[in-house]
Image (cartoon, helix red, strand yellow):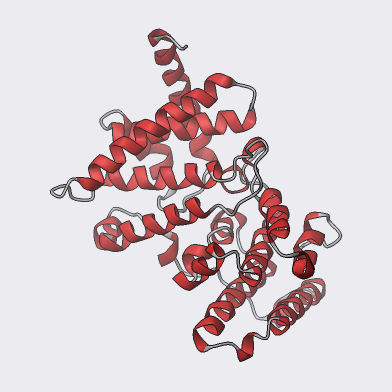
Amino acid sequence: MISTSRWRTLELRLMYHYTAVVSHTIPGCNGAPTEAWQRTIPQLSFESEVVLNPMLALSALHLHAHSHNDSNMAIALRRYLDQSLVNHRQALSNPGEELSEQLWLSAVLLSHIYWLLAHQAQPNEAYELPLQAFKMLEGVGVLFEQKNVFLGRQGYMWIGYEAMPHIAPEAKLSIAAQIQLRSIEEDLTYLLDAFDVPALPDNDKSIYIEAKNYVLHHYRAFFSGADPKTFQRFIAFIVVRCQPGYRNKLEQYDPLAMALMARMLVLQSGLGHAWWMNGRGDYEVIERDVRGIRELIPANLRWVMDWPCKVLDREIILTRD
């Protein structure tokens, strides 16, 4: 049991950790520019618990991810997350409440928290896709769509509205990059042909082709030298950027949809570690997702995971050189 005085001390620690460390590890993306993470959120937290509680929860999550034996941080994370959800739901359910900057930042903070919490390893539980995190991301997108003019004027953006990363003409890529890119193109083409996608009904065909093109575009952007700090946010959020039918396929544990997602996720291996996306410790994302997806796929189709697993095992090394 943590005493009242200990909670106050812990809150100060979490506040300091957020401003000194966490806010500098998250680039200007996923709903808020750099200034919002480093200045606006701390400032608004002094006047609004709608911002304060998710900020403290994110700080506790960062500390717990880096020190999983710290039971106080696990307790703090759940305490401030529970309070965040209560405040957030109350604000959303108030019919007279306009979307405020505070409520938007609460949604952005919660989306980051849920992304990692959805990947938290649970003892004796089989892997499941992070469907709740997908729904949270989709919900934030709906919130942005309702008030995108207001939020845009405040300098906020959501990933579903951002321009896709720039790609260079293939002729300008290095020879090594061209070879790797062609290998990826061949893998994706073979994958869709193996499931006879061209012969599928138009609706299903468009879902798979859009997802395949999304994956391929980002590999091209990777080899074109896209900035990792701004590029990373597109990797995990294929579910937000593609049409809703793609998420429906994932909810049905569709092998091809999951195989495409795995190819998107392993691209992160070439970009370096970002804790808010990759996770850490009990909240590790990429390895857990890709290995877990392989186990979800029927044994006779697990060959579809050979390529992403080779990237994880460093049999295939993604490099821009």
The image position of residue 166, as x and y in percent, is 56, 71
194 on left or right of 246: right
Q: Residue at x 27, y 46 (%)?
A: 101
Is residue 157 shown to the viewer in this render? no
**In the foreground, 140 or 30:** 140
Furthest residue toward right: 315
The image position of residue 124, as x and y in percent, is 68, 38
Q: Is residue 300 above or below residue 202?
A: above
23 on left or right of 216: left
63 on left or right of 182: left
Q: Residue at x 37, y 55 (%)?
A: 140
Is residue 165 shown to the viewer in this render? yes
Residue 153 picture quarter: bottom left
Q: Is residue 207 above or below residue 293?
A: below
303 on left or right of 142: right
**In the foreground, 84 or 27:** 84
Q: What is the quadrant of the C terminus in the image?
A: bottom right
Residue 7 picture quarter: top left
Q: Residue at x 47, y 20 (%)?
A: 13
The image position of residue 21, as x and y in percent, is 53, 32
